Image (tube, rainbow, N blue to C red):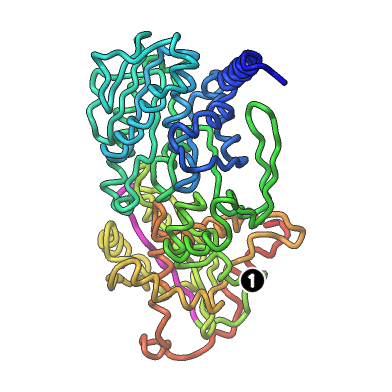
């Protein structure tokens, strides 16, 4: 039987081994530090914790300088990124300066207090108290300094960062879920990040910025980070398809099959179903799936559309529908023109123009589409933006131009048109040839479907406006619209559009 001294020596050896293990591995550090902050909650291991830890270790090693992580709420994102990781990295570089930002001051303060509690805990001090100590003259809830000149500062979106900078900038939940639908509030967070916060790195080359958040909108801060080329770790609660994930440090490969739950020991099928009910399709798609619009689509589901290989030879009517923009600057709205045909209750979209163009270029586009499809004699132009000027310029040159005053809001008009798409009465040209290759002339179809699927959360709604304008025009019987009821017994003006093998 071992003596008390032998047991004490064994405990010291084991403690030293655990200490070295925690120093080498963030994942090991998290497991050991967990009881300090969550003494009543058992630690539940899961692969996503390991994966996030490896990404953060890659930042520490200098292999990543810009990282954005998207995962559901209450899946340890703040504890891992904003609490455990900074405390772990201070073991290696206690002189490092950190800046932490959240959407509210209270949330940023809570994270800061948890971080300080861990740094001052007996467990942390007993193991690494000889490396640094928090100074007594700068030890507040939102800012504290250590004896090696390292600083951790917490603030909120729009908060004061003048004179403050760091080697690490951590943005944890920059958007308030309640306010994310407000363009003003959402853009305020994005502008603060781009124009103010991102400039506060002490060393632009060696410093790192990490954003961790749940997706709330297609134009949230994650979208801006992806445009800037950030490394993206997206972890949905339910795998949407078979997905292979490679861990950046260990090269471990993990495969998720479609339908696999992210953390079943924490949220199983019953809990996930409850979240879907509580959040609704949009909320669940963003906050849990990290895809701000539902995979199936919003008001216009992706699988509602019908497709044709060859347009019918007998059609009732042809038309164009245009949604115009005020100006053609990059970042402005698009000019969208649709060409469509109608036969009974069915509508066939044939072609689309979509570009960010100026007023003269808009005129040229309408002229070109009218020349290409001469039987599309009804030309609907929304009487907003450049619409009145376009109508006045072209009305004596191209016959059939009709000014359309939008009736009701965009969402209301879309809701009125969605049932017709759901019923399978709207046909798009099939974007692939029989051999499976994409048809270049029909490359617009997939983008068109996507633009309607993300409405009303997409960045642009020009396709939606042009499409709903057309469908609302054709919602009534032709006789009620002032047209004689007849069938044009001839091939469409574009012939067998898209069926020439050269198009394939």
Instruction: Classify the position of the N terminus by image quarter.
Output: top right
- In depth, the one of 354 and 149 nearer the eye is 149
The vertical placement of 497 against 252, above or below, is below
Residue 108 is situated, as x and y percent measured from the top left of the image, at: 31, 35
Residue drawn 33% across and 32% down? 101
The vertical placement of 248 against 273, above or below, is above
Residue drawn 60% across and 35% down? 50
Query: Would residue 220 be found to the left or right of residue 138 on screen?
Result: right
Residue 86 is situated, as x and y percent measured from the top left of the image, at: 44, 24
Category of crowding for the residue at label 1, using alpha-carbon neighbours closer than 10 angstroms: few (below 14), some (14–19), many (at least 20): some
- In depth, the one of 213 and 119 nearer the eye is 119
Residue located farthest toward the right when viewing the structure as drawn: 435
Q: Does the magenta portion include 320?
A: yes
Element assignment for label 1: strand
- In depth, the one of 159 and 50 nearer the eye is 50
Instruction: Classify the position of the C terminus by image quarter.
Output: bottom right
Residue drawn 48% across and 78% down? 420
Whether residue 371 can be seen here: no
What is the span of residues highlighted in magenta in the rendered image? Answer: 317-328
Q: Quadrant of residue 188?
A: top left
Residue 458 is situated, as x and y percent measured from the top left of the image, at: 41, 54
The vertical placement of 255 against 418, above or below, is above
Residue 377 is situated, as x and y percent measured from the top left of the image, at: 43, 73
Residue drawn 29% across and 34% down? 109
- In depth, the one of 388 and 173 nearer the eye is 173
What is the number of callouts on the image?
A: 1
Q: Does the magenta portion include 98?
A: no
| Residue on which disc 1 sits | 308
Whether residue 356 can be seen here: yes
């Amino acid at each position: 039987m071992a003596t008390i001294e032998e047991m004490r020596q064994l405990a010291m050896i084991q403690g030293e081994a655990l200490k070295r293990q925690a120093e080498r591995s963030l994942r090991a550090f998290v497991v050991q530090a967990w009881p300090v902050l969550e003494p009543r909650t058992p630690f539940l291991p899961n692969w996503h914790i390991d994966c996030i830890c490896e990404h953060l270790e890659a930042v520490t090693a200098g292999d990543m300088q810009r990282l954005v992580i998207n995962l559901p709420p209450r899946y340890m994102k703040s504890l891992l990124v904003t609490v455990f990781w900074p405390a772990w990295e201070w073991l290696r570089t206690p002189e490092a300066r950190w800046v932490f930002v959240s959407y509210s001051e209270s949330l940023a303060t809570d994270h800061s207090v948890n971080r300080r509690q861990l740094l001052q805990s007996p467990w942390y001090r007993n193991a690494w108290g000889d490396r640094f100590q928090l100074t007594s003259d700068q030890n507040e809830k939102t800012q504290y300094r250590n004896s090696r000149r390292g600083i951790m500062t917490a603030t909120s979106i729009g908060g004061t960062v003048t004179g403050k900078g760091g080697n690490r900038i951590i943005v944890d939940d920059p958007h308030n879920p309640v306010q994310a639908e407000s363009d003003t509030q959402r853009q305020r967070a994005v502008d603060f990040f781009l124009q103010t916060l991102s400039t506060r790195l002490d060393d632009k080359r060696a410093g790192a910025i990490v954003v961790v958040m749940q997706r709330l909108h297609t134009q949230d801060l994650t979208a801006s980070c992806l445009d800037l080329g950030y490394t993206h770790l997206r972890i949905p609660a339910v795998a949407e398809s078979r997905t292979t994930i490679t861990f950046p440090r260990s090269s471990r490969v993990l495969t998720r099959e479609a339908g696999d739950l992210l953390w079943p020991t924490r949220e199983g099928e019953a809990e996930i179903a409850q979240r879907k009910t509580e959040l609704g399709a949009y909320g669940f798609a963003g906050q849990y799936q990290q895809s701000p619009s539902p995979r199936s689509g919003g008001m216009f589901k992706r699988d509602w559309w019908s497709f044709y290989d060859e347009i019918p030879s007998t059609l009732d009517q042809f038309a164009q529908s245009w949604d115009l923009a005020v100006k053609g600057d990059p970042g402005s709205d698009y000019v969208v023109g649709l060409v469509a045909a109608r036969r009974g209750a069915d509508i066939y979209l044939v072609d689309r123009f979509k570009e960010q163009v100026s007023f003269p270029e808009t005129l040229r586009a309408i002229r070109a589409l009218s020349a290409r499809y001469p039987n599309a004699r009804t030309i609907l132009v929304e009487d907003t933006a450049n619409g009145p000027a376009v109508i006045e310029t072209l009305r004596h040159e191209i016959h059939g131009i009709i000014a359309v005053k939008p009736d009701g809001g965009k969402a209301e008009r879309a809701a009125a048109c969605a049932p017709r798409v759901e019923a399978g009465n709207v046909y798009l040209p099939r974007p692939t040839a029989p051999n499976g290759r994409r048809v270049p002339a029909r490359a617009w179809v997939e983008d068109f479907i996507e633009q309607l699927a993300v409405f009303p959360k997409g960045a642009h709604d020009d396709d939606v406006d042009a499409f709903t304008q057309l469908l609302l025009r054709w919602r009534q019987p032709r006789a009620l619209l002032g047209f004689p009821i007849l069938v044009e017994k001839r091939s469409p003006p574009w012939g067998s559009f898209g069926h020439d093998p050269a198009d394939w």
